[in-house]
Amino acid sequence: MRANAVLAAVLMSSIGMCACGGSGNNVSSGSGGGASLVAAPAVSTTAGQNGAVIVSLASTTAGAAIYYTVDGSMPSSSSEQYQAPFLVASNLTVKAIATAGGTSSAVTTQTFSPNIPAGALVWSDEFSNSTGTPAQPNPAIWTYDTGNSGFGNQELETYCAWGSSASPCSAVNPSEYVGSYPGTDGVLYIVAQQPSSGVYTSARLKTQGLFSFQYGRLEFRALVPEAQGFWPAAWLLGNNIATVNWPACGEQDVLERVDAAASPDWNDGSIHGTGFTGGTGLGTMYYFPDNETAAEWHTYGMIWKPGSVQYYVDDPVNNIYATYTPSSLTPLNDGAVWPFDTGQSNFIILNLAIGGDWPGPPDSSTPFPSEMLVDYVRIYTN
């Protein structure tokens, strides 16, 4: 969400083997020679789509930290620390070590050669549910931020996890669920509710610790509520928020807007990192054509390549409205640092905030309950 929207302390909380077209696990000698007392990381994979795989790393040494690279370079404790399974949809080599007590393991190496063509769908959550009964969002993909800490923006809602009945949350009237919708077999519902005067509930789903990716075309098909005090968003943060904190982890805001529909209506696509947050962030308004609003179905997309983040609405070829590169930081200040090519993968967040510094509070015109709908989340190769 908007740069000052991240409360790092909140976000820091938080498979079997298959043939995957790689060269297999190769373990070379650890630093210092001889047998290491730290077990080298094991690589396991689960299937994505069209030949892509989701890679998990694990060491049997209790408390060991795992560091890895995806460019073939030798890993060290200065490399990216493994935080979550990550998507592999391009030809690359993963190298990883485990460290504990100042000792490093041998290096595990696995090369992946999926040879997937550009534009292929490699991962998605279609939020399928044709049962007519509200269902839990896939727990293998989605977890939750919860509570009413304000999340760095003075937000007013309490975020509720699936199944929570801790007041003011309700398992009977959930804040998130997968349900049927006309024209689809299922969509994700994120529901803003007012269970009592001045009390608001909603949901913030995230893939942190469960799924992440680096590079590709990410697309959300969504319909958002528009009213005073509503703040829907679909965005990303780096897995390395757990080690470098925000904003050094980087933030990519793909879908974000506040309050009632405007004329013309709009979406804001922005990026944030060290030295460019808040008023110094990089954001671009996309204005919908006449007679269109964000309260209709649209696709919101990000094209993430080395050295580039682009945003589009509805058409990834002809409707790119923002392009950011490291040179975009030049006019800002000497402390601005491009955070999107350090080797980390990013996780996905979907939420509907209520109130906060940007939209302000709801008022008598704000309808409750109201829903943010997400038909799918998809990742394609560039």
Image (spheres, rainbow, N blue to C red):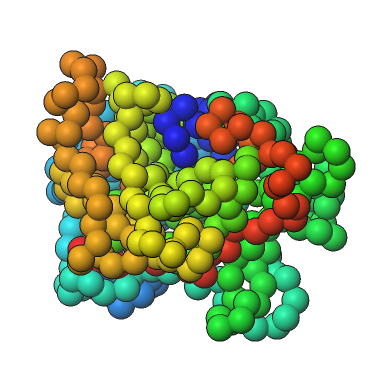
> Measured from the top left, where is residue 122 in percent x and y?
33, 70
Residue 37 position by quadrant: top left
Farthest-out residue, top: 334
| Near-viewer residue (271 or 80) | 271
Q: Residue placed at 67% from the left, 72% from the top?
A: 179
| Near-viewer residue (184 or 79) | 184
**Quadrant of image for the C terminus:** bottom left
Is 69 on the left-hand or right-hand side of 232?
A: left
Residue 369 position by quadrant: bottom right
> Measured from the top left, where is residue 153 in percent x and y?
57, 28
333 vs 112: above or below: above
> Measured from the top left, where is residue 241 in percent x and y?
42, 33
Q: Residue placed at 51% from the left, 66% from the top?
A: 296
Is 268 on the left-hand or right-hand side of 203?
A: left
Q: Residue placed at 18% from the left, 71% from the top?
A: 118
115 vs 163: above or below: below
> Measured from the top left, where is residue 23 in percent x and y?
20, 66
135 vs 364: above or below: below
| Near-viewer residue (170 or 27) | 170
Can residue 341 be seen here?
A: yes
Is 16 on the left-hand or right-hand side of 170?
A: left
Can residue 10 be seen here?
A: no
